[in-house]
Image: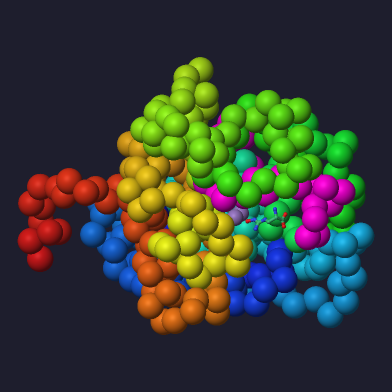
Amino acid sequence: HSVAVLGAPFSKGQKRGGVENGPKAIRDAGLIERLSHLDYPVHDFGDLSFQHLEKDEPYMHVPFPRTVGRANKLLSGAVSNAVGAGHTTIMLGGDHSLAIGSVEGHAKQRPDLCLIWVDAHADINTPFTSPSGNLHGQSVAFMLKELQNKMPELPGFSWVKPFLSAKDLVYIGLRDVDPGEYDILKDLGVQYFTMRDIDRLGIQRVMEVTFDHLLSRKQRPIHLSFDIDAMDPSLAPATGTPVNGGLTYREGIWITEEIHNTGLLSVMDLVEVNPDLGASREAVESTASMAVDVIASALGQTREGGPITQESQT
Ligand code: DIR
Ligand code: MN
Ligand code: MN
């Protein structure tokens, strides 16, 4: 087993600058060094370079459709190659529109994947329901077969064909869901856990039900799409759309530890770290360090420690 790290410095899925600096902030917080203490070789593939498009008129009120479509096509190929080469792949965003390419590229190699979406937001708007127009709030709508006839043909996205069923998706951490998104979640019967559900059930039970829902019929690869704004803003303030009342540190780490313990993590996205939005250097560093902690724990770093090995003695 080996790990691939892939940076995706991209921000056009929303309107605030700075989230393209997320990969650098997460690396500066010591990601690669931390992963080097785990059991497998880490390959850092660096950052993708995304093309700037001169002319990219909005589609309805959706900004930068061709730019976002093209960036995701490039990312899809990169994720597909990394997974095809046998790596557990970590995609560092960038904004959450990048999940379109990341999950699509993963599905090319592993059509039976399931998707765990950890986020304050459902990101399941269509261009018709989206209040903002921003594509980072619409990523899941491009993936779902059930929404095929609710999605317009956006310029830049002709390469994306819906590939995921609503039953193969679970949300954790929701607390800011738009009305059109609520209707879609209910219509499709999507399994989701809001922060209220976590308060009621506890995070341990939430993860048990999540795995029952996704894995009880058969073992399959997991795609974890982790928006840092799922965490409470006290832990991850440097992000574009913070929402109060998020995951505690221990809930966040419990989620990633349990996903690691399935042995099925195949691709993880860590998105929406925006170092330009921190109120101070400390705010940026705590956000990036939170990102490193959830990634390391998804890849097997434990709170229990581990035995002496040749690696730990050097
Ligand atoms: C909002 C915000 N639901 C939208 N979405 C965000 O623009 O569609 N997702 N911030 O992470
Ligand atoms: Mn998101
Ligand atoms: Mn979010």
x then y, percent, for residue 71: 70, 64
Q: Is residue 288 left or right of residue 176?
A: left
| Overall secondary structure of the magenta section | loop
Q: Position of residue 11 (x, y in %)?
A: 66, 70
Tell which quarter ligand 2 is in: bottom right
In magenta, the rendered stretch is: 108-133
Identify the residue shown where x is 42% and y is 63%: 234
Q: Residue furthest top?
A: 217
- Residue 199 drawn in magenta: no
Q: The C terminus appears in which quarter of the rendering? A: bottom left
Give the total number of marks visible in the rendering.
Answer: 0
Residue 260's place in the image compared with 69, above or below, is above
Answer whether residue 67 is visible to the viewer in this image.
Answer: yes
Q: Residue at x 88, y 67 (%)?
A: 58
Judge from the rendering whether residue 143 lies leftward or rightward of residue 1; answer left or right: right
Q: Residue at x 88, y 76 (%)?
A: 55
As drawn, 148 above or below 177: above
Measured as percent of width and height from the top left, residue 196 is found at: 51, 38
- Where is residue 131? Give x, y as percent: 80, 55
Depicted 109 relative to depicted 120: above or below: above
Colour convention? rainbow
